[in-house]
Amino acid sequence: MLRSFRLAPLALLILVPLLAACSRSRPEAQAEGSTNSIALTGAGATFPSVLYNRWLVVYHDHNPKVAITYAAVGSGEGVRRFIGEKITDGEKVDFGASDAAMSDEEIANADNNVLMVPVTAGCVAVAYNLTGFQGDLKLSRRAYAGIFNGEIKKWNDPLIVQTNPGAKLPDMAISPVVRQDASGTTFAFTKNLDAISERWHQQFSAAMLVKWPGNPIRAKGNQGVAGAIAGSDGRVGYVGYEFARKIGLDTAALENKEGKFLKPRPESCRAALATAEVPENFRVFVPDPTGKESYPIVTFSWILLRKKYKDAATAKALQELFQWSLRDGQRYASELGYIQLPPAIAEKAEVALKSIGTEG
């Protein structure tokens, strides 16, 4: 049985950007200590990084001969490092992580030697900082799409007032906060906007990196966006729910496809993910979930692995690490604000992991 422990919310946020830097000596120390030690490196999505860092610490505690570092650099950068094009020695990774499944072109650039495995899931919150506002802010589909496509510029816009009757909404400019780096969280958010807003679909579509209208505040990583929202009154942005929760940001209740307003919660996110039909390659998106109890913006998060590794020990260590994450590791998801994978998907992912082998 693995030991469970809790880190203070602030410590978790600090750990995300610093873990890789603080633990880079770990693999070297482990390698010096035993010829049976192995070092694994990964990089990618910030969205699941709080959970991944918990996994890696707990797993290493139980398996001290396996030293693992994970750099939370964003999904786009994680895919780039995984593919291995134009990277330095310090950027080479054994696995990547992304909240946007790799495209056919990206897989081809990796010589088709790619296995995408979903290991967790979560919801993207629209978090806000609005001093003096009482109650839960409700944003219709038209309202939150309008905020981020530049149509709605003030907090007392009629479309916001309409769904918040009696609330004191200030005559204040809205300051959107967005990601400046290539991001799977951005992809999940804009995938939803693309599904619900014709204007967004025509002008922007879904992407990991967006040329946002107007002059929004830009921040790096989910932790950067969460911090920027907290930093000043009148700001609103999209961020992984777990980051909003950890620093106590208010989150809006969003209108779903059935016209019901829901806040991001484990139960509403699970309901949305349950509507997903998962193909053999695990490239599954849920841009506009059906069901009255479904929160509208959810995403799976994938680990990017190679079907064939040069080193048999690396292949075996990665198999065992992510088999554990799909079994015992899932229990850490809920306490950190993530969603446990539906059992059927976790079982299918475990079967896929068994296919990993070595070259030659």
Image (cartoon, rainbow, N blue to C red):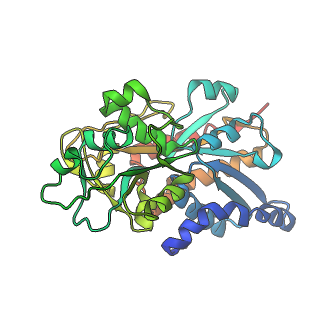
In the picture provided, is 243 more to the left or to the right than 253? right
Residue 40's spot in the image, x, y percent? 72, 53
Q: Is residue 124 above or below residue 192?
A: below
Residue furthest out toward the left: 166
Q: Looking at the rendering, in which quadrant would you find the C terminus?
A: top right
Q: Is residue 191 above or below residue 323?
A: above
Q: How many marks?
A: 0
Q: Nearer the viewer, residue 143 or 182?
A: 143
Name the residue located 51 percent from the left edge and 52 percent from the top edge. 47
Q: Nearer the viewer, residue 251 or 317?
A: 251
Name the residue located 72 percent from the left edge and 60 percent from the top edge. 66
Q: Looking at the rendering, in which quadrant would you find the N terminus?
A: bottom right
* Camera sees residue 1: no
Q: Nearer the viewer, residue 221 or 148?
A: 148
Residue furthest out toward the front: 171
Residue 274's spot in the image, x, y percent? 32, 43
* Camera sees residue 161: yes
Name the residue located 75 percent from the left edge and 47 percent from the top edge. 91
Q: Is residue 317 above or below residue 290?
A: below
In the picture provided, is 345 more to the left or to the right than 22? left
In the picture provided, is 108 more to the left or to the right than 149? right
The image quarter in which residue 311 lies: top right
Residue 11's spot in the image, x, y percent? 55, 72
Residue 78's spot in the image, x, y percent? 64, 43
Q: Nearer the viewer, residue 242 or 119?
A: 242
Name the residue located 61 percent from the left edge and 24 percent from the top edge. 105
